[in-house]
Image: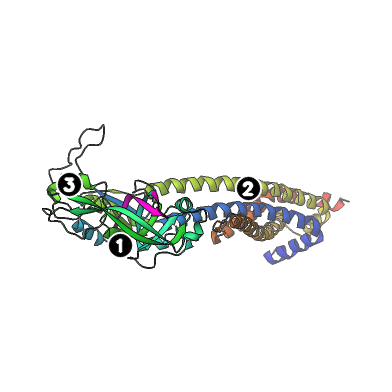
């Protein structure tokens, strides 16, 4: 029997019991829909997490710190790994890192504890300098106000909790001014250091430095919900953000200043407590870490955490797939029941086919095609229903987030491989469900089948 004849005959048989076959096909569609909907949520959550983390710069950023032989509290003094002197994390090292392949930028981390005065009231907080590239990190999406107007503007962005401390109505703070009080580090006359060193660098020499109180007026331009400066390289969550270039010109006293004044080997040079090196992509972080360590510095990144995250989502997707398959298993029983009933109703037809010369394999193929057709249409409608269900869940979630004044998210995603896999899986399950009915139909005795009433 030709494939075209088999297909025509199978479609005709399916049309004769259209209600029962439609309900069976709908059962397959529901099973496939549940599978697609659950996996689309898993894929969507994974893509959302990967997007946010990649935008945050955590996985493409390397924290570089100088090696030292100082012992930590309660720990023995560290011995140098070699006879070579410890290398300073200075401007020469910074320029060398900038020239490494696949490096986007290298910038110092500027953080200092200070006092803010607003409406003649003091507020203690941590200030952090933000590079221009942080604008595209995703941390400032949905913020009130705007980002810094320029890289050297005397402007500030407040974290929402700090803004609430300043005013009961945080939105009214935008456009107002506050006073930043900080301790400026000034080299003593005997120090031959540069006077324009960045705020987190040490420009002291053996002559030391003095600390002078200073003030700076900053205009509040925005309020952000998240804490963009709470990275792994900082020692505290910054609640006031300002342009990195502006923060660097303040020469604010840092924690590492006392350490560097004791080490007079770097007299007259600008040294940094730490530098952040951004790679073009997370895949190049390992090679850059190796290169930086060969330069004589410590290098750290959070790339290993992404491996654990991928493992978590793999297990999560597997569990969602298992629960989705339960509904498909129920649909499989429906296909078996439909085809077994079709055998009882069509025994005379099977007997006629065999009497006309149809082989057992032809009868098997006929029932296989019927099962495959139900699986195909069930898979198509199932993918469509699953996509609609995912969109409905996303819409409901975003409606709830909007009521909570939170940013919308893309909760579900149906990539092409999920569509193809779900369709193929639905057809395969349907064909597997047709194994027993097809085998039973092929074994019918044509004489007994023709005598069946």
> Circle 1 is placed at which residue position?
245
Q: CA distance from mark 2 to mark 3?
A: 66 Å
> Circle 3 is placed at which residue position?
261
Q: Earlier in the sequence, mark 1 or mark 2?
A: 1
Q: Is label 1 in a helix, a strand or a loop?
A: helix
Q: Are marks 2 and 3 in contact (CB under 8 Å)?
A: no
Q: Which residue is at 37% across, 53% downward?
A: 116
Most foreground residue, 338 or 243: 243
Count residues near mark 2 (Cα–Cα under 10 Å), then give few for <14, some for 14-19, many for 20+.
Answer: some
Count residues near mark 3 (Cα–Cα under 10 Å), then give few for <14, some for 14-19, many for 20+.
Answer: some
Side of 207 relative to 418 (left or right): left
Location of the N terminus (image quadrant): bottom right
Q: CA distance from mark 3 to mark 1?
A: 24 Å
Side of 299 relative to 434 (left or right): left
> Circle 2 is placed at which residue position?
325
Q: Which residue is at 70% across, 46% downward?
A: 330
Q: Earlier in the sequence, mark 3 or mark 1?
A: 1
Q: Pinpoint residue 448: horizontal percent, then vertical percent.
A: 83, 49
Q: Which residue is at 58% across, 48% downward?
A: 321
Q: Which residues are magenta?
A: 100-123
Please identify the quarter of the rendering in which residue 288 is found: bottom left
Residue 114 in the magenta stretch? The answer is yes
Q: Is label 3 in a helix, a strand or a loop?
A: helix
């Amino acid at each position: 029997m030709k494939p075209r004849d088999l297909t025509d005959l199978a479609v005709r048989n399916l049309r004769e019991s259209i209600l029962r076959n439609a309900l069976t096909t709908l059962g397959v569609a529901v099973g496939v829909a549940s599978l697609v909907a659950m996996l689309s949520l898993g894929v969507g959550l994974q893509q959302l997490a990967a997007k946010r983390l990649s935008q945050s710069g955590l996985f493409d950023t390397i924290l570089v710190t100088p090696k030292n032989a100082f012992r930590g509290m309660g720990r023995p003094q560290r011995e140098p790994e070699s006879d070579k002197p410890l290398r300073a994390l200075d401007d020469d090292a910074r320029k060398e890192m900038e020239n490494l392949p696949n490096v986007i930028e290298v910038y110092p981390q500027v953080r200092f504890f200070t006092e803010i005065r607003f409406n003649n009231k003091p507020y203690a907080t941590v200030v952090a300098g933000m590079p221009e590239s942080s604008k595209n990190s995703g941390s400032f999406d949905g913020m009130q106000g705007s980002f810094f107007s320029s890289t050297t503007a005397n402007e500030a962005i407040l974290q929402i909790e700090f803004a609430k401390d300043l005013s009961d109505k945080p939105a009214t703070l935008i456009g107002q001014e506050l006073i930043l009080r900080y301790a400026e580090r000034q080299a003593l006359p005997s120090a031959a250091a540069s006077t324009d060193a960045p705020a987190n660098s040490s420009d002291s020499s053996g002559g030391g430095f003095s600390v002078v109180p200073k003030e700076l007026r900053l205009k509040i331009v925005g309020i952000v919900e998240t804490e963009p400066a709470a990275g792994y390289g900082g020692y505290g969550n910054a609640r006031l953000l300002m342009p990195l270039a502006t923060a660097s010109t303040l020469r604010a006293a840092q924690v590492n200043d006392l350490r560097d004044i004791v080490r007079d080997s770097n007299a007259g040079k600008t040294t940094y407590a730490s530098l952040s090196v951004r790679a073009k992509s997370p895949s190049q972080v390992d090679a850059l870490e190796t290169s930086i360590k060969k330069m004589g510095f410590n290098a750290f990144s959070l790339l290993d955490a992404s491996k654990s995250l991928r493992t978590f989502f793999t297990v999560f997707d597997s569990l969602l797939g298992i629960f989705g398959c339960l509904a498909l298993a129920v649909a499989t029983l429906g296909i078996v029941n439909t085809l077994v009933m079709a055998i009882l109703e069509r025994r005379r037809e099977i007997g006629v086919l065999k009497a006309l010369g149809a082989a057992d394999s032809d009868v098997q193929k006929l029932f296989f095609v019927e099962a495959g057709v139900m699986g195909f249409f069930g898979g198509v409608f199932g993918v469509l229903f699953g996509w609609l269900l995912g969109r409905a869940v996303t819409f409901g979630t975003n409606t709830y987030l909007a009521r909570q004044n939170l940013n919308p998210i893309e909760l579900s995603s149906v990539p092409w491989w999920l569509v193809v896999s779900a369709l193929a899986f639905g057809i395969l399950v349907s064909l597997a469900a047709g194994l027993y009915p097809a085998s039973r139909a092929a074994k019918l005795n044509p004489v007994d089948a023709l005598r069946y009433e």
